[in-house]
Amino acid sequence: MTGHGVDPARVRALKDREDARFAASHPTSVAMLERARRSMPNGVPMQWFASSYAHPPMFVLEGAGARFRDVDGNEYVDFNIADMSTFCGHAPEPVVRAIAERASRGTQFLLPDENAIWVAEELAHRWRLPAWQFTLSASQANVEVIRVARVATGRSVTLLFDGKYHGHFDQALVELRDGRLVPEELGLPPDVVRQTRVIPWNDPDALARALEPRDVAVVLAEPAMTNNHGLILPDPGFHEVLRRLTRETGTVLALDETHTLVCGPGGLCDRWGLEPDAVSLGKSIAGGVPIGAYGMTAELASVFAAEQPDDREEEPSVATGGTLFANALSMAAARAALSEVLTADAYTHTAALGARLAEGLEAAVVRAGLPWSVHRLFARSGTAFGPVPPRSAEEARACEDRLLTNLVRVYLANRGVWEAIPGAGPTVAVPATTEDVDRYVAAYGELLEELTASGAVAPATSGPGR
């Protein structure tokens, strides 16, 4: 047995069996993948489609509500919801209607329309920050938040927390490795580590030391860390310390609610009464249509240059913007999603289903006698392969078991349940039902029974759910 309470040989045997079952039930996807390899590296248009899964990527046909189907006709209850970007569900009717109407009258003008005002006003109301700007992704929103903070403070360093994920841009792709700060992936400049500082989560002393030189422009953090093979919640009082120390050192505090906006109409900022200087969003606020947004205090927003008279030389402006940012289609989709899908009642519904999921997972873990813990955060629940939820990325890594994580994913997929990508956790979509949650719990319980059974691994008997 491992420290996770399971036999590694049994995990491997189950994984091999389930991989074979997955391949056998996806012949059309396998054929399309081979065709795609001739025109795209690894047969995919974006590398995450291959690297996020330990089984072959499959090709999707359609989705509706909390479910989608692949090209082989297999149907899945979706608990990954495109890494929380389709929290509204697939093809939500109000968003589909708004997209069709907007597309019929033009999608992009490099000029604003009235929907942009409505969306900015609604986000200002939900997050209690008065000034908003829009991009096409939360990654780009975080880039612009960092640039605004540099201008506002005259400083250059970005402070992040170990185990973070804030997007695929240079300053965010650094990590602690054997006590050293190093580029996280290939293709990054070696000197990127001089622009970023990384410290442990839930460590007020490390935070104070990192801010003491007063060279940090911005602390960029999630209210709860969501990318660590389980959820890492803040210790009681940690956010209060974070807010006090950033104010004392003149540092901008930016909270990335891209994942945690599934917790409530105003994310965890509203749920927990947090008071950042800036907040960044993306993913589901436009019902799956590409969008990013960030809100600021009036003080931060003052760094944007005013209009210049015709006879005056233009002053340098903050390095923000993009041709397709804040396009009319994104704004129409966001207005529909915020006004008709992401309502207070929707968040009450998903929080209740998230609690039901957590209770079912806890019951399955207890029945199996495994030393695992279950986390709860409104619409999101899941397990960590350790007896207590981790408090830091280091503790989360100690609980990590990639083979076991990959087994969970393919096992559930073969039973019609689409699990979250590794590092995340299952999240309940707005149109999900109690039956959807119970299907997840039943499949998960079946897996734990097989993991802890004695004797040989039984052969597979059927394909995925239809």
Image: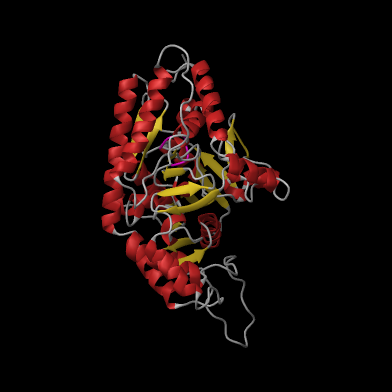
- Would residue 229 be counted in the magenta stretch? yes
Q: Seen from this angle, which residue lies furthest top?
A: 455
Q: Is residue 86 above or below residue 165?
A: below
The colour scheme of the drawn protein is secondary structure
Where does the C terminus fall, quadrant-wise? top left
The answer to which quarter of the image holds residue 314 is: bottom right
The answer to which quarter of the image holds residue 92 is: bottom left
- From the viewer's side, name the closer residue of 302 and 208: 302
| Residue 218: image location, x then y, percent | 50, 52
Q: Is residue 344 above or below residue 367?
A: below
Highlighted range, magenta: 226-231
- In this rendering, would 428 be left or right of 27? left
Residue 390 seen in the current view:
no
| Residue 267: image location, x then y, percent | 35, 53
- Secondary structure character of the magenta stretch overall: loop
| Residue 103: image location, x then y, percent | 50, 73
- From the viewer's side, name the closer residue of 15 and 357: 15
The answer to which quarter of the image holds residue 143 is: bottom right
| Residue 401: image location, x then y, percent | 50, 26
